[in-house]
Image: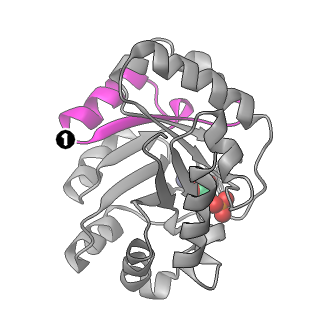
């Protein structure tokens, strides 16, 4: 079995009591905090920035924070997120004029870089940079909102990227984001993913722990 990680997207958390809600979901068994940053420019929605990431750290959240940048441009804000306590920083190739430079910038700032591919973005973007990545994030919805339906063509893409990762022999996480729930998580794992972002499926459930346990059970049987 792969080293599976469940990463609740805090986009669906209760922002009026974010620290508490993040703590609860981690206590309930989540592994990684998925932190969605949107700018009302690259995507049609506006969320949170480094101040909030830093506030979560000050509040005592010590687990891995996976910052998903849906913003354009990206470079200016990367050092701020590193200072704010981010671990992974992922960005979309369409949002950077110099993808290799951005990857290096993330690494130079002490974080682990990841590239995010939208549903219609080709995996050829990985060809010249895969060896320098710690994470590849495949979007299974168009970025901007929580609660959307998983796009079925993602399965094939996960299989293709799994092959690419294995051919490098490197430890690169394969994360999938959007529309993941108890029903489809095993199929997504079978295709080759190891890190699962789930926002609404976890935060809109009555019992986080029960939902995460059910997801793990499905992962075990996949
Ligand atoms: C979408 C975000 C996702 C989103 C996932 O642009 O990147 O992380 O919050 O939400 P669900 O799991 O509800 O599809
Ligand atoms: Zn995300």
Left or right relative to 127: residue 153: right
Up/down of 57 relative to 167, above or below: below
Q: Which residue is mark 1?
A: 110
Q: Nearer the viewer, residue 141 or 23?
A: 23
Q: Residue at x 48, y 22 (%)?
A: 165
Horizontal and vertical percent for residue 172?
A: 40, 30
Q: Nearer the viewer, residue 71 or 83?
A: 83
- Can you see residue 51? yes
The part of the image, by quadrant, that contains residue 31 is: bottom left
Circle 1 crowding by C-alpha within 10 Å: few under 14, some 14–19, many from 20:
some
Horizontal and vertical percent for residue 190?
A: 65, 38
Residue range of the region highlighted in magenta in the rendering: 92-121
Left or right relative to 103: residue 212: right
Horizontal and vertical percent for residue 6?
A: 49, 57
Q: Nearer the viewer, residue 125 or 134?
A: 134
Is residue 110 magenta-colored?
yes
The part of the image, by quadrant, that contains residue 55 is: bottom left
């Amino acid at each position: 079995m792969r080293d599976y990680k469940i990463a609740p997207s805090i986009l669906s958390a209760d922002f009026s009591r974010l620290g508490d809600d993040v703590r609860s979901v981690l206590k309930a068994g989540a592994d990684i905090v998925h932190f969605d940053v949107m700018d009302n420019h690259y995507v049609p929605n506006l969320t949170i920035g480094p101040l909030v990431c830093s506030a979560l750290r000050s509040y005592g959240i010590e687990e891995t924070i996976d910052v998903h940048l849906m913003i354009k441009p990206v470079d200016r804000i990367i050092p701020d997120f590193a200072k704010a306590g981010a671990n992974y920083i992922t960005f979309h190739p369409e949002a950077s004029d110099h993808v290799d430079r951005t990857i290096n910038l993330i690494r130079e700032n002490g974080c682990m870089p990841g590239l995010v591919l939208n549903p219609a973005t080709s995996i050829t973007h990985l060809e010249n940079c895969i060896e320098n990545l710690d994470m590849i994030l495949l979007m299974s919805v168009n970025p901007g909102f929580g609660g959307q339906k998983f796009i079925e063509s993602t399965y094939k893409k996960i299989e293709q990227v799994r092959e690419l990762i294995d051919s490098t022999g490197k430890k690169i996480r394969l994360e999938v984001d959007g529309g993941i729930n108890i029903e489809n998580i095993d199929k997504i794992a079978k295709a080759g993913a190891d890190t699962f972002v789930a926002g609404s499926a976890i935060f809109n459930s009555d019992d986080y722990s029960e939902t995460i346990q059910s997801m793990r059970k499905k992962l075990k049987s996949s």
